[in-house]
Image: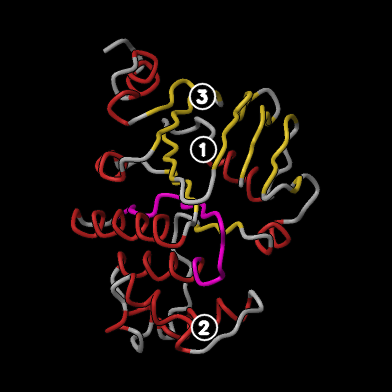
Amino acid sequence: MLQAHALGHAFGRQCALDGVSLRMDSGDTLCVIGPNGSGKTTLFNTLSGQLQPQRGQVLFRGMALRGRRPDQIARLGLGRKFQVPSVFGTLSSLDNLLLARRAAGLPARPADVDTLLRDTGLAGRAQVPAGELSHGERQWLEIAMVTSQAPRLLLLDEPTAGMTQAETLATVALIRKLCQRDGIACIVVEHDMQFVAALESKVMVLADGRVIAQGAFDTVRQSAAVRQAYLGHDA
């Protein structure tokens, strides 16, 4: 579904991505972790079209993404949720979802989003203005809004930031359901190691724009290179 090969991007003399490659198939999950400034946001910006790679290429569903605008890439089925929820606070949860469907040119009836409301635990809050939801509920609503547009690949930027432990585990369950039931692939940038461990997905670790480790969470967290990147010394 997604193939990124040898991506490279620099801002002046600062190398943000240096030879990063990855592959995602239907239903796959991948957590991208790394210290601040490691290239995580630049990777997401490159995959979603906010930035054009200076080196390498991205193929999505067999199509090259170079030169395509973010809205064109979104219509191909790549959805992105940013770190800070951006919902319409005066509209109900239901209306936010219907608006997201209309923006994607999809049918927008309550029945079209009923499953998503139940998946996110918002069925009983469907008529509540989004501005009155808790922080965790707003995060779930935005995940539902992006998912309502029928993506094949989701990019989630710190979806559990500011969540309680219970909300974090509920988010893990939500992502697993979307991937396993609906076949959506999902790449998550996350700093919460509890979330990363609970998701039990493949993990990619970035540092200074390069992939320094990848594999199961229990494997990468024992890597000397990973400890060096996070702690600044061999721990």
Q: In the image, what residue type sits under mark 1?
A: Lys
Where is residue 171, by image quadrant? bottom left
Give neighbour class at mark 3: few <14, some 14-19, many 20+ (Cα, 10 Å). many
Residue at the spot 37% in from the left edge and 69% down from the top edge = 138
Q: How many angstroms separate mark 3 from mark 2 (CA)?
A: 39 Å
Q: Is residue 193 above or below residue 135?
A: above
Q: Earlier in the sequence, mark 3 or mark 1?
A: 1
Give neighbour class at mark 2: few <14, some 14-19, many 20+ (Cα, 10 Å). many
Residue matched to label 2 = 98
Residue at the spot 54% in from the left edge and 42% down from the top edge = 24
Q: Nearer the viewer, mark 3 or mark 1?
A: 3
Residue 197 in the image: state x and y as whole percent: 27, 39
Q: Secondary structure at mark 3?
A: strand
Where is residue 22, by image quadrant? top right
Q: In the image, what residue type sits under mark 2?
A: Leu
Q: Which mark is residue 211?
A: 3
Q: Is residue 164 left or right of residue 188?
A: left
Q: Nearer the viewer, mark 2 or mark 1?
A: 2
Magenta range: 147-162
Q: Nearer the viewer, residue 160 or 202?
A: 202
